[in-house]
Image (cartoon, rainbow, N blue to C red):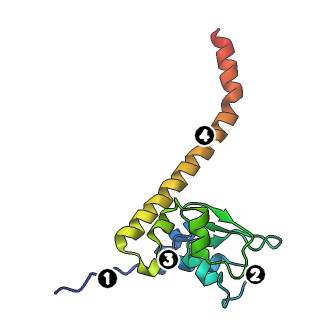
């Protein structure tokens, strides 16, 4: 029986995933001021495993967002279970539906989640572009419409 192929990816190439918080490692690194210790039920490692990265501030330090569905939750308590809270507030999330840590994902599952994240980012970028383009060109359009009469 053949052994599975192992693909080596340099750490530099993995950095492109940092901005999207796709890798659990990067989600862990995002938590700057998380108020709960590693011994709590909603520790940094458990939050990251459940798909969350830190989006808090010094003032609101218990805010985290899912890298797939974008759901932001705050008001965490030390006994909250990240997977359960994620499922409760975002049952439609593709990551929650898979329901396992990154290290347990199959390649197919990882690629499907990556596709969902990239599609979401493209959609968000296009919406932002459309709004900005429309705002910047409303006056020009009104002038054109007036001249066309």
Q: Which dot marks residue 12?
A: 3
Disc 1 target residue? 6
Calculate the distance from the C-alpha at mark 2 to the C-alpha at mark 1.
38 Å
Chain-order first, disc 3 or disc 2:
3
Mark 4 surroundings: few (<14), some (14-19) or many (≥20) residues within 10 A: few
Calculate the distance from the C-alpha at mark 1 to the C-alpha at mark 4.
42 Å
Calculate the distance from the C-alpha at mark 2 to the C-alpha at mark 4.
38 Å
Disc 4 target residue? 130
90 horizontally vs 113: left or right: right
6 horizontally vs 70: left or right: left
The residue at 58%/73% (across/down) is: 84
Q: Position of residue 80 (x, y in %)?
A: 67, 78
Q: In the rendered view, tell whether residue 15 sits above or below residue 46.
A: above
Marks 2 and 1 close (CB-CB < 8 Å): no
The residue at 68%/66% (across/down) is: 73
Chain-order first, disc 2 or disc 4:
2
């Amino acid at each position: 029986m053949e052994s599975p192929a192992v693909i080596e990816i340099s750490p530099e190439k993995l950095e492109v995933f940092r901005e999207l918080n796709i890798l659990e490692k990067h989600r862990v690194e995002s938590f700057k001021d998380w108020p709960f210790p590693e011994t709590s039920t909603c520790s940094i490692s458990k939050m990251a495993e459940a798909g969350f990265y830190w989006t808090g501030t010094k003032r609101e330090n218990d805010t985290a967002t899912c890298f797939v569905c974008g759901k932001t939750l705050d008001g965490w308590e030390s006994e909250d279970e990240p997977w359960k809270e994620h499922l409760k507030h975002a049952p439609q999330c593709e990551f929650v539906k898979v329901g396992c840590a990154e290290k347990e994902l199959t390649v197919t599952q990882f690629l499907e989640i990556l596709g969902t994240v990239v599609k979401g980012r493209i959609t968000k970028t296009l919406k932002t572009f459309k709004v900005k383009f429309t705002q910047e060109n409303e006056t020009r359009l009104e002038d054109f419409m007036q001249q066309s009469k």
